[in-house]
Amino acid sequence: MHRLDVASKIRRNHDPKLSCDLYRCSLSWQDENTLLVGWGDAVKVCKLKPYEGTTRPPPGCLSDFYVEIVSMFTTEFFITGLAPLGIDMMVALTLPKGLQEHTGGTRPELRVLEPLVDDYVDHSSDILAVRGYASYCSSDYRLESLHDEGLFFIVSPKDVIVAKPRNEDDHVAWLLEHSKFEEALEAVVSSRGLMRHTLQGVGEDYIAFLLKQESYKRAAEVCKIALGQDKARWEANVYRFAQHRQLRALVEFLPQNNPRLDPTAYEIALNEFLQFDPQGFLELVSTWNSELYSIQTMVNAVLDRLSYDPTCIPLLQALAKLYSYQAKFDLAMSIYLKIGASNEVFELIQRYGLFDMVQEKLLTLLTLDKDKMIALLLDRVVHQKDGFPMADTVEKLREHPYFLYCFLDAVFDWNPAMCDSYHLELATLYAKFCRTKLLPLLRSSNNYPLEEALQLCQQQQGLVPEVIFLLGRMGNTKEALQHIMAKLADVQQAIAFCKEHNDNELWEDLIMYSLDKPHFISTLLQSIGTHVDPIKLIKRIPEGLQIPRLRDALVKILRDYNLQISLREGCKKILVSDCIVLLGRLNRQHSRAAFVDDCQICPACDRKLLFKDTRQVDDVVVFFCKHSFHRNCLPMHGHIVCSICSLEKSRWFGS
């Protein structure tokens, strides 16, 4: 290596059998300090470096630089030329190692190599079409380059080939040429410097390829990526998918705004679903904006489809949807009622406010879905919305008692006052359909005639508790007690009834009824001690009558008596103690001195109570009520009282 101030020798390390005439040494400067050397099948990368630090040039060397080989490796091919590519890469013109030692016989290859310390990485290779290559050897080729322009010249005896690095467009073109559409699409999406290729163009090619491969789902996904807002391309692909009858795969990605396609495109998609997927057709009709397509066109198509499949539920639901979009609510309602689609019926009523239709089809809607219809009626009646007078609704439902029961029961639960005038009718319905609610109604309401309610309950079997309650409310307590004892035989309830009314005659009747029933007597002895003198009952017990748990009952009576005595004595002690305390407090208050100043006026004479002139001094009387008088202003005889307080008492209680 020679430079003006550098001289160095680089030793050959390839096979010495390779002739220097056939395998020339190839030299190329990568930059002003880096030299690429290729000879035979060996490559060296040499750098000029200055002597630094403690490193000194050898004796006799006048240069301040030395040569360092930073990379050296042997290849699997012969090097016929080298040229730099960027900072860390190189382009090599190579010939494969053949069986013949001194002739080429094969096409040359242009390779991109990345040198390492003692190895290399072969990034790419291109086989060159050279005329007469079979008779050429390594020395017949040369590689030259214009580094700044990125051009490489391959020179042979008959050809000069110009090579340059591939750009992004070349890469995309190569991917498309080799049917690597997925990679090409990714390259176009991520690239910003393409000149010849566009996302839409590559996407169209990929979509056509996928349709040919019958990969319809992926083709639809590519449409979303590649077509963007290009209305014309979207419509063209709608027809393309329609030819394959695969619009069902594309519909998920079909744009509805930005861009909005021609209505025909959406109608084509709907028609495919109509023919092959009725449920999907219903979903599209439900979710798509009805402005995207001609509603009447789709109605005609559905009617035609129903002509040979009249029982298809999804198509009937879709037809009802289309009728509702046309404001033909009566037709939509009739279809929903025909197929029993309760959810859709009430959604239609709420969305479009079809409450007049509710009154017309009241019984039909109740039969369809009682709970939803009752909730709708309740909302309209309770909130007093127009078109739903409660009286009219009740009148219409009277021919159907069960529906009337459901309606009145819902209103009563929400606001009992709203059906005050229907409480007797509601009681009749409760007696027929829900007896557990009858007694709570009778207890909580005062808006029904007692005689009619009693007659109602007496006519029905099993309503004894209700009869007893009504008899008690009407004041016929004796008959009520007889029902309890005769029909219910429930002594505890009889005792509770007597306690509630606190009537001695009722207790007497209960005792008389219980005298021949030992278990009644036992229960009475344990329960009536605080209400009736147990001695009255004990004296009437017939001799020789065996009473169960009599001992326990008597013990309880004694304990209750002792408890009452103890409580009475305790209360007496507390009362006496409180009286003593209060009397002591009153005495202390009355014994305190009373303050009288010279500004106070005598209520009787309107003069000051106290005088500074001692000749006019008079005695002063102060009552416990704190009113003060001159002694001479009070009566001389009789009981002396405060005239002010006595006057106030006479006003309140009379003289």
Image (spheres, grey):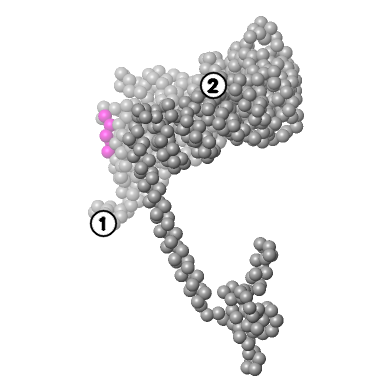
Horizontal and vertical percent for residue 556? 36, 40
Mark 1 residue crowding within 10 angstroms, few (<14) / some (14–19) / many (20+): few
The residue at the far left in this view is 59
Q: Earlier in the sequence, mark 1 or mark 2?
A: 1
Instruction: Name the residue type under label 1.
Output: Thr
Residue at image position (59%, 14%) is 277
Q: Is residue 305 above or below residue 184?
A: above
490 or 296: nearer the viewer: 490
The residue at the far top in this view is 308
Q: Which image quadrant for residue 56?
A: bottom left
Residue 294 locus on image (x, y percent): 73, 20
Q: Check disc 2 and report the residue beneath it.
A: 462
> Does the rendering let one see residue 80?
no
Residue at image point 35% right, 33% down: 550
Left or right: residue 182 versus residue 8 is right
Q: Give the residue type at disc 2.
A: Gly
Q: How many marks?
A: 2
Whether residue 478 is visible, yes or no, is yes
Q: Report helix, strand or loop for mark 1.
A: loop
Q: Residue at x 43, y 35 (%)?
A: 537
Residue 635 or 155: which is nearer the viewer? 635
Q: Position of residue 652 (x, y in %)?
A: 67, 63
Residue drawn where x is 48% and y is 74% of the image? 588
Q: Which image quarter is the C terminus in?
A: bottom right
On-image quarter of the N terminus: top left
Of the numbered discs in the image, which one, if any, rests on residue 54? 1
| Coordinates of residue 373 in the picture (x, y in percent) | 65, 24
Q: Main secondary structure of the magenta part?
A: loop
Query: Is 353 covered by the magenta stretch?
Result: no
Which residues make up the magenta segment?
A: 11-15
Label 1 to label 2: alpha-carbon separation? 121 Å
